[in-house]
Image (tube, coloured by chain):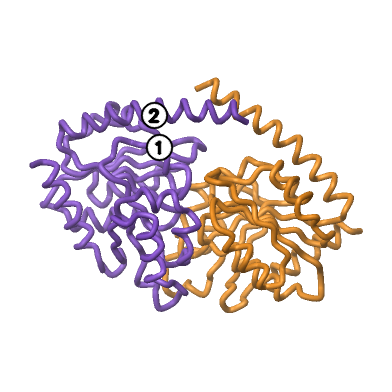
Chain colours: A purple, B orange
Amino acid sequence: MSFTVDVRRRALAANDAEAEQLRRRFAGERTLVTNLISSPGSGKTTLLEATARRLAGRATAAVIEGDVATELDAERLRAAGLPAYQILTGGACHLDARQIGKALTAAAFPRVDLLFIENVGNLICPTTYDLGEDFKVALLSVAEGSDKPFKYPAIFARAEVTVVTKVDLLPHVRFDLPAVERQVLSLNPSATLLRTSSATGEGIDAWCDLLLERAARKRA
Amino acid sequence: MSFTVDVRRRALAANDAEAEQLRRRFAGERTLVTNLISSPGSGKTTLLEATARRLAGRATAAVIEGDVATELDAERLRAAGLPAYQILTGGACHLDARQIGKALTAAAFPRVDLLFIENVGNLICPTTYDLGEDFKVALLSVAEGSDKPFKYPAIFARAEVTVVTKVDLLPHVRFDLPAVERQVLSLNPSATLLRTSSATGEGIDAWCDLLLERAARKRA
């Protein structure tokens, strides 16, 4: 087993080195990069669709989309007006920095103000792979239950922003929002929590304002 | 990379060998073993709570519970009357056969008719790790969206049973049940699909009948 751990440690070190190169590139291009991580079906793609509508004309944006299989999400995002490059991991459970570097080259990405990386739907494995992002965003749908931050602590400890999604479903599910806030803040006292519904639009302005403010700060 | 792949292949081969030992043990004990796999928050624990209530007095049952962190799920299941042994993976994204073997020894599990293994919340990584189960069960909550089988094909291809959960939320979410059925059956033509709501009890009888019928067949 220690042999396996060692292989994993070396893979993570190699990833960190590639992520630092990406971070320098994104700094030079003044692109704000977010790494969106959640369970499958928490609403990452739907949030990005709503974000594209709200940001139109205010900032340029693009997406690198990670999935085990299918180009469905990239197609949805392109239909929403976002340039989207699909990475198919072929079974792998997370994106890595090398894949992001290749995507940027292959796609000849336009210089954008905001680059969203939508990671593979998985609350565990993507957490430890730095992709050169400015910050990680964890999404948690109210349909998933309010015990998740303590059950999956690594991502909620590392995400600067936790977005509680699908709050339009709150009347129909058992979900203790204050309990989630307490868990997230105990794991990461400086975390920002947002509550959103891509269906009703609730919270989308606050999310976009946060992005635009952070993007302006990076350009300054 | 090929080095990493080779390490992974050897780990899977070792796991398969341990799983075969477990399978022989479970055959000898006439215990029906299911391996429940889904995203975080799809309702695995809640389904097992509802199952425990419905099976009380009709079959003996126990649970091996896999989580990255916290004993919350095992505590819930014990409160529902199910003997539950918690495995904490400490960050690992799936259970393996060795952990199951250790749990059976450490816990001195009673011989039961039904052993449920609730895997770590993750729709990807647990798929390839045989735990000696009779069959895998994939859960998909209607809040997760109806594109999931094609987006995460490996688990839906391998699961004998797909349980669509939280159908009480159908009036409040966009979810195309016939589309999900078409995807699952195209991935696995012999799959059984069930629709359930642990909140209303819909489908719980059909699920328990399936388990009892399979358990009786194994004892025969």
Q: Residue at point 70% right, 62% down?
A: B84
Q: Nearer the viewer, residue A154 or A32?
A: A154
Residue B185 in sight: no
Residue type, mark 1 in image: Tyr
**For mark 1, does the 10 Å Cα neighbourhood hold few (<14), some (14 to 19), or many (20 or more) residues?**
some
What subunit carries mark 1? A
Badge 2 element: helix
For marks 2 and 1, the one nearer the N-term is: 2
Q: Residue at point 31% right, 38% down?
A: A85
Q: Residue B121 shows which numbered tag?
A: none
Percent x, y of residue B191: 66, 54
Discs 2 and 1 share one subunit: yes
Q: Quadrant of residue A175?
A: bottom left
Q: In the current view of this chain or complex, which residue is farthest to the top?
A: B3
Q: Which residue is mark 2?
A: A15
| B166 relative to A50 in the view: left or right | right
**For mark 2, does the 10 Å Cα neighbourhood hold few (<14), some (14 to 19), or many (20 or more) residues?**
some
Q: Say whether marks 2 and 1 touch (CB < 8 Å).
A: yes
| A129 relative to A33 in the view: left or right | right
As displayed, is residue B12 above or below residue A61?
A: above
Percent x, y of residue B81: 71, 72
Residue B38 in sight: yes
The number of discs equals 2
As displayed, is residue B121 above or below residue A177?
A: above
Q: Residue at point 79% right, 44% down?
A: B22
Q: Quadrant of residue B60?
A: bottom right
| B73 relative to B28 in the view: left or right | left
Q: Which residue is mark 1?
A: A129
Q: Residue at point 17% right, 49% down?
A: A214
| A204 relative to B178 in the view: left or right | left
